């Protein structure tokens, strides 16, 4: 049977901790319910904005199984399975598929600031992971990996590796890269997606993006923009983007992954907005600035739990 084509707004779900830094699985379920109620077409878990790098393997499985069981097919769930080891990444990806994931998202193999592999090794990596599963692979093209992935190489992977068909582009000049990727890859590029908290959302959609993977704090705002664009009203989409851009910018440039947790806590979605040490708590002035920018927009996060 043909695979469904995933489009729209797929925000990254935060991993919820209590004040002691332990997993708060009840809070995790509430965060997911909020994100679905806010109009998310799907969600992504265990990504960098989920603090996946701060979780043990056992905790990863707990979050994965908790979310997939709780979602129960209401929306598709993308599970990030990135690991340097081909074998470990393949095992993670198979486990995610078996648990009900709709797709896996994977960065190219890297470790630290200097350990990389070349294009041949990267293609072998994705090919072997693909052989272990039957669901789509999204390649996360992000600066954190420190691995140059040209549009021509990504198109080659789409054409030659069976399950590679989605691409989250977070690099500089993302729109230009998306446009070139679509031109070179043709029908093999099923899902060219925007990333990086929607800071380049409109240019990326102008270039042909069909999905957006943003932070999890205001999917309702991103959904309004994407719905207008998908409906052909690009002027309305641009107007809405201008309204939400100050919040998008504040998250991207001032807060990072903590922004969605602060918004969720303020609105009673979760009890704690803690991130894991060595991350420091958000400075009170930064928190106040975030809420000052968010309140006029009335995002659902600020009232969902009240």
Image (spheres, helix red, strand yellow):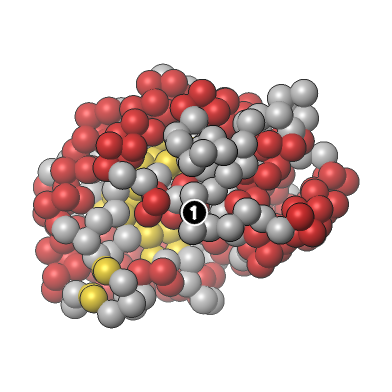
Identify the image quadrant of the C terminus. top right
Tell me where residue 181 appears, x and y as whole percent: 39, 68
In-front residue for pair 131/188 = 131
Which residue sits furthest front? 20
Q: Is residue 133 left or right of residue 137?
A: left
299 lies left or right of 7: right
Residue 243, percent from left and from top: 81, 54
Q: Which residue is mark 1?
A: 277
Return the x and y of residue 129 as percentages of the image width and height. 16, 51
Please tell me whether residue 79 is drawn above or below residue 204 in the rendered image.
above
The answer to whether residue 32 of the structure is visible from this angle is no
Is residue 52 shown above or below 19? below
Is 299 displayed left or right of 162 in the figure? right
Q: Residue at x 31, y 44 (%)?
A: 56
Image spot of residue 144 (x, y percent): 41, 69
Q: Is residue 101 left or right of residue 260?
A: left
The residue sitting at 12% across, 47% down in the picture is: 131
Q: Residue at x 49, y 58 (%)?
A: 278
Image position of 203 with respect to 231: above or below: below
Q: Which corner quadrant holds the N terminus?
A: top left
Give the residue drawn at x 79%, y 59%: 285
């Amino acid at each position: 049977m043909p695979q469904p084509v995933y489009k729209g707004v797929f925000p990254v779900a935060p991993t919820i901790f209590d004040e002691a830094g332990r997993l708060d699985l009840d809070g995790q379920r509430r965060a997911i319910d909020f994100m679905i109620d806010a109009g998310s077409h799907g969600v992504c878990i265990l990504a960098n904005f989920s603090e996946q790098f701060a979780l043990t393997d056992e905790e990863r499985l707990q979050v994965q199984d908790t979310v997939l069981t709780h979602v129960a097919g209401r929306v598709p769930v993308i599970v990030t399975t990135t690991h340097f080891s081909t074998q470990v990444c393949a095992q993670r990806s198979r486990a995610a598929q078996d648990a009900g994931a709709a797709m896996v998202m994977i960065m190219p193999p890297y470790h630290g600031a200097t350990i990389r592999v070349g294009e041949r090794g990267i293609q072998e990596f994705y090919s072997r992971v693909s052989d272990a599963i039957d669901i789509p692979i999204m390649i996360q093209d992000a600066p954190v990996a420190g691995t140059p992935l040209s549009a021509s190489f990504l198109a080659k992977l789409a054409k030659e590796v069976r399950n590679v068909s989605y691409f989250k582009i977070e690099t500089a000049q993302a729109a230009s890269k998306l446009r070139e990727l679509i031109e070179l890859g043709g029908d093999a590029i099923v899902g060219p997606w925007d990333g990086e908290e929607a800071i380049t959302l409109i240019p990326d959609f102008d270039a042909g993006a069909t999905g957006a993977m943003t932070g999890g704090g205001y999917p309702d705002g991103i959904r309004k923009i994407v719905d207008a664009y998908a409906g052909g009203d690009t002027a309305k989409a641009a107007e809405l983007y201008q309204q939400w851009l100050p919040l998008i910018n504040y998250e991207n440039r001032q807060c990072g992954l903590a922004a969605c947790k602060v918004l969720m806590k303020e609105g009673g979605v979760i009890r704690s907005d803690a991130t894991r040490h060595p991350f420091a708590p958000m400075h009170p002035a930064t928190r106040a600035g975030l809420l000052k920018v968010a309140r006029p927009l009335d995002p659902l996060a600020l009232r969902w739990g009240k």
